[in-house]
Amino acid sequence: MLDSILLGIQIVLAVIGAYQLLLTFFGWYRRKNKQHHAPQKSFAVLVAAHNEEQVVGALIENLKTLDYPKELYDIFVICDNCTDGTAQIARDHGVYAMERSNPKLRGKGYAIEWMLKELWKMERQYDAIVMFDADNLVSPDYLTHMNDDLCNGSKVIQAYLDTKNPHDSWITAAYATTYWYCNRLWQLPRTNLGLANFLGGTGMCFDTNLLKEMGWGATSLVEDLEFTMRCVQRGVNPIFNYDARVYDEKPLTFKASARQRLRWMQGHFDVARRYFFPLLWQGIKEGNWAKIDSAVYAANVYNLFIGSILTIVLWIDQLLPGVPTFTSLYAFMPAAFALFTVATYAQFPLAMMIEKAPLKSYLYIITYPIFLLSWWPITFYAFFTQNNKQWSHTQHTRVIRLEDMQSKQAS
């Protein structure tokens, strides 16, 4: 009986894996026939910040020099429970410092919800809201691309996420590889197939009327994924803008990375538990593949959790002396599964090649499998601590400006 259950789980996971692999083939090409528009949309640019005096100044300087009419956007720094000089730095740079103090409701989701309520009270109203983290840098044409998408009828837009410090350590290099892979072989295929894209926590743009109608309501540890699910439920599919670039600073050490990823996975379990079955059932009833695909995406955290445990059990079973107790799906078609495994891992260097990653990044391919395997214990621990809603802050130790990053990329 147990053997049949485990075999059934293997079949389900194999089908989902094959589906994900199939999707990647639709990311090998990119359409470029988007209609362009003169600047007309106004933007409230929100910067979420908690004790970010080290990096927020560089982002504000970056945002103030975007290639977009200055009268069409304002910058608001959400100083969320700050105890340092973040608010003063924002004021010194001539932008709005919106100070919030609520130690009981901490985290970006709560800060954004508060900020939007404050924004709706203001005399000036904006056509759209864009959101960044304080450690980001933004391509000069970011708002130009958001203006085009809004004018073309899009309501929720995710920019291309990149890493501003890809070569600081093997950890930052792993994040960079993951970003190249996700942008090219997760996000772009869904764009090409007309499915819903997924918000990435920063570089996000929202139509104001939609936000007023829906409310924010995304206060989990992964507010981006939660809001994605809420949009898809309403039939609003977020889109992906490949040309608008946002550069995110990644943690340098494995310990800091593990803490950040643990928070993501705890939040992912929470969102999957609340949205998977309703979204899946809704998609089946409506014959809406975008909703079914989004439900499958939400369940990925459970796929990883169950798949990692199952793999370890089967490995141990195979290594023990005597006849194996459990049936391994791999034993039925070893050549096919070996090819599938190779193809799965080959996606990462393939994405790097398509995205023209710096040559130096390929040196870290040898350590990338360690990063991938480290998701197993992190996900396992997250499953048993998923009710922990405590938000953790990633410390930043230096300033990187856009021109610094660009000069490194050119060298």
Image: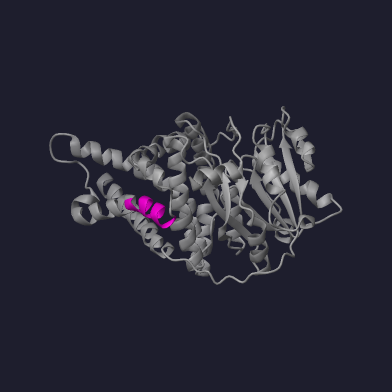
Residue 56 versus residue 198 in the image, above or below: above
Q: Which residue occupies the extreme right position in the image?
A: 123
- Horizontal side of residue 163 vs 87, given as left or right: left
Q: Which residue occupies the extreme left position in the image?
A: 322
Q: Which residue occupies the extreme top position in the image?
A: 83
- Residue 299: % across, % down: 46, 50
- Residue 194: % across, % down: 51, 67
Res 284 visible: no
- Residue 317: % across, % down: 22, 38
Residue pictured at 49% horizontal, 58% vertical: 187
Location of residue 68 by image quarter:
bottom right
- Which of the pair 184/264 is nearer the observer? 184
Image coloring type = one colour
Question: Would you say the magenta stretch is mainly helix, strand or loop?
Answer: helix
- Which of the pair 110/9 is nearer the observer? 110
Residue pictured at 32% horizontal, 54% vertical: 14
Q: Which residues are magenta?
A: 346-355
Q: How many marks?
A: 0
Residue 107 versus residue 358 in the image, above or below: above
Location of residue 308 by image quarter:
top left
Residue pictured at 19% horizontal, 39% vertical: 318
Location of residue 155 by image quarter:
bottom right
Residue 274 versus residue 78 in the image, above or below: below
Q: Is residue 354 magenta?
A: yes
- Residue 146: % across, % down: 65, 60
Res 191 visible: yes
Q: Is residue 402 magenta?
A: no
- Which of the pair 224/352 is nearer the observer? 352
